[in-house]
Image (spheres, rainbow, N blue to C red):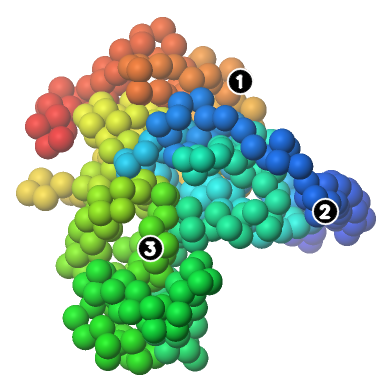
Amino acid sequence: MALFGKKNSNYISSKETKRISKENRRITGEIEKKRNRKHIPESEYLSTMKNPDNVVEFDNVHTYFFTDIGVVKAVDGVSFEVPQGKTVGIVGESGCGKSVTSLSLMQLVQRPQGQTVEGEIRFNTGEKVYNIVNTPTSVMQTLRGNEMSMIFQEPMTSLNPVFRIGEQVDEIVALHNPSMSKEDVKRRTIEMLELVGIANSEGVYRMYPHELSGGMRQRICIAIGLACSPRLIIADEPTTALDVTIQAQILDLMRSLKDKINSSIMLITHDLGVIAEMADYVVVMYAGRVVEKGTAQEIFKTPSHPYTIGLMRSKPVVGKQVDRLYSIPGKVPNPINMPDYCYFKDRCELSCDKCNGSYPGVVKLSPTHEVSCYRYQDRKEAGWLMEEHLGKEGASERESEA
Ligand SMILES: Nc1ncnc2c1ncn2[C@@H]1O[C@H](COP(=O)(O)OP(=O)(O)OP(=O)(O)O)[C@@H](O)[C@H]1O
Ligand SMILES: [Mg+2]
């Protein structure tokens, strides 16, 4: 039969799978052994920031999953930084590695198959700089919650359904303030609930998660995340599960809390509207790599990578009549066996002969604006490609919008 007659290039025999998993166990076993040593000296995981004004610096980070069908290069050489007190937005289609990037920073990637195998993630606590990649789990536990915290996408799954809200927030407050008395912990919890805009805080303290609305649950998650005034808040799609009015309230809340405790936010979303409203800097990811980064103004005014331009075009604009909303053709490639040319080439409407070469290097369009695309290696001028592609009218329209 035709189905079985022709060997599929994606087909892997059981013998091959066994060989791959044996090899994987060898690699991950070695990394785990190194990590699980007792008494790791500080010199192995302390580092120095390139710029002390940054809270986080991702430097050529590679996080892979060693699976039975091959190595998934979920994050493949990512570099960007999060300055103190600023919001950095990370955008990209589903599966491009946004969550794995943030999980790598929290050291919450599913182990042992998931491992950060190369690069440095430098985290600045003000006193010390940790290279998260080599930091032992026991030290990580003091950083998570105290110095950095994460707000997840689905508030229902982040809260435990069988415990009252008060107990859950109390637990976090007590864990990070072991010397506090029980009454003080409760007082702090009520304070936190009020801070995130919960009116009936004493009542909510005694409720179970199912008794609250989605927006309230997300507020509770934010309260838990902020209970210890972290230097960095990682928000992974914090408003995706919420309706637009609640979304606006939650974003407002995050912004005001961020200013109150002077922390930085790493905001992950595929919603460009949220990014435009919140972010100071934008990082555009595609298939595990950063294809473009810059200030929010640069990215919205002069999107330069064809992928970023595609994302901008697929965003509906209020008041503009279109027959059909644009969508980028094709889909994100499977991060196993990636080609060695530009990962976006096969979907790119603007690809040229040069794009057959190896993966394009970084071109600096301004001190803060960088793009990885062959089209800029000769004409290092932002904006011209957008003009060419959207037409002069479209480009100036975008400009007036921004
Ligand atoms: N535990 C895992 N084992 C194997 N592969 C994984 C694992 N977790 C994630 N991946 C792969 O890593 C890649 C990046 O996933 P990631 O969750 O970071 O995407 P994302 O950009 O956050 O997408 P979304 O917008 O849908 O949340 C995907 O191809 C995914 O299949
Ligand atoms: Mg994700």
Spot occupied by residue 371 in the image (x, y as percentages of width and height): 42, 24
Against 171, residue 42 (above or below) is above
In this figure, which residue is indicated by the disc labeled 1? Answer: 358
Among numbered discs 2 and 3, the one appearing first in the sequence: 2
Across and down, in percent, residue 107 comes to 61, 53
Amino acid type assigned to the residue bearing label 3 in the image? Leu
Mark 3 or mark 1, which is nearer the start of the sequence? 3
Report the side of 291 relative to 27 (left or right): left
Q: Is mark 1 within 8 Å of ligand 1?
A: no
On residue 38, the disc is: 2
| Rendering coords of residue 245 (x, y %) | 17, 67
What residue sits right under mark 3 in the picture? 226
Residue 295 visible, this orientation: yes
Say whether mark 3 is within 8 Å of ligand 2: no
Secondary element at tag 3: helix
Q: Number of labelled discs?
A: 3
Q: Amino acid at mark 1?
A: Ser
Is residue 285 visible to us here? no
Q: Residue at x 38, y 36 (%)?
A: 83
